[in-house]
Image: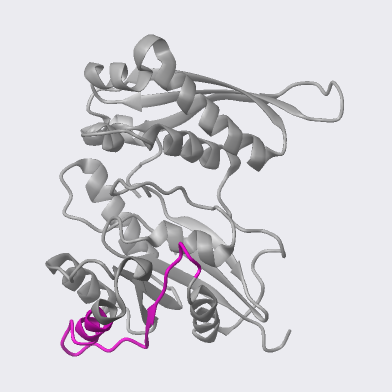
Amino acid sequence: MNNFRSGFVAIVGRPNTGKSTLVNALVGDKVAITSPHPNTTRHAIRGILNGPNFQAVLVDTPGIHKPKTLLGHRLNSVVGESLDSVDAILMCLPADEPSSAGDAYIVAEIAKHPGAKKLAVVTKTDLVSKSALAARLAGIVGMAENFTWHEIVPVSAVINDQVDLLSGLIGDALAVGPQFYPDGVVSDQGQEQWICELIREAALRDARQEVPHSIAVTIDEMSQREKSGNEPFFDIHATIHIERDSQRGILLGHQGERLKDIGARARADIERILQARVFLGLHVKVSKDWQRNTKLLEKLGFGDS
């Protein structure tokens, strides 16, 4: 274990650039929820990548964006804090989109951390032709003056193309250090937080217009029933918070059918995580304009750090 390497790696990028999908592929398990909607990730979620002689703590961060709400400002702050004292920074740049002013801003922020190795990860390569990918790679090489990437790696997390190569490069970027987590641990995310995320992921599916950004989830009660047989059984009651009365009807659906679908999808994932049977009771509550309300943000777990 004398040559064992370990450290922290921040995953950054604009919203919807494939950060969470990449983290899940590297870890080899689902540790972050995904959806087509921007800013699905709202906390710094840490996935544990265990290599042959290294352990990397991958910090999946919210997408850096121009904030329109107090929540947006706080999500950007999460990213800034995540860049401090990391060994490497991976910036996700989608192969099917050109670089933007937002990318240039993120590169400038990355450059403020000279001690960290910088890797450009070109994601979603399965969506473009080889010639388009070559042009995208050339553009990334010269996207910023006085800045050089340590590595530029094209990957597709969806088809698992070059994910193993990237994993090895992450290991090479780390310094000699201790193993932080036991073998088999894939995330340090708390159980209740992960359950909230799984419910939110289920609610995000098929959501439209402004609804995805307005959804937050809290656990009201979680308890385990006394054993009756070999399989444990949990009772979980959770609240899905939205911002306006009109959104309540959208989430409930006709005669509550949409909410039932959300519960069924979430329960399947929760039972897999807990390795137990689950009763999941969901309640929809209007927490008016919570994204702009300091007290409500703190109540929903987005306190100003």
- The question of residue 55 being in magenta is answered with no
Closest to the observer, 30 or 242: 30
| Residue 57 versus residue 131 in the image, above or below | above
Which quarter of the figure has residue 153?
bottom left
| Residue 183 versus residue 135 in the image, above or below | above
The quadrant of the rendering that contains the N terminus is bottom right
Residue 230 image offset from top left, x and y in percent: 86, 30
- The question of residue 144 being in magenta is answered with yes
In this rendering, does residue 83 appear at all?
Answer: no
The outermost residue toward the left is 101
Horizontal side of residue 132 vs 23, given as left or right: left
In this rendering, does residue 54 appear at all?
Answer: yes
Residue 42 image offset from top left, x and y in percent: 37, 47
Which quarter of the figure has residue 190?
top right
Which quarter of the figure has residue 62?
bottom left
Segment colored magenta:
134-160
User: Which residue is depicted at the point 36% across and 36% down?
Assistant: 298
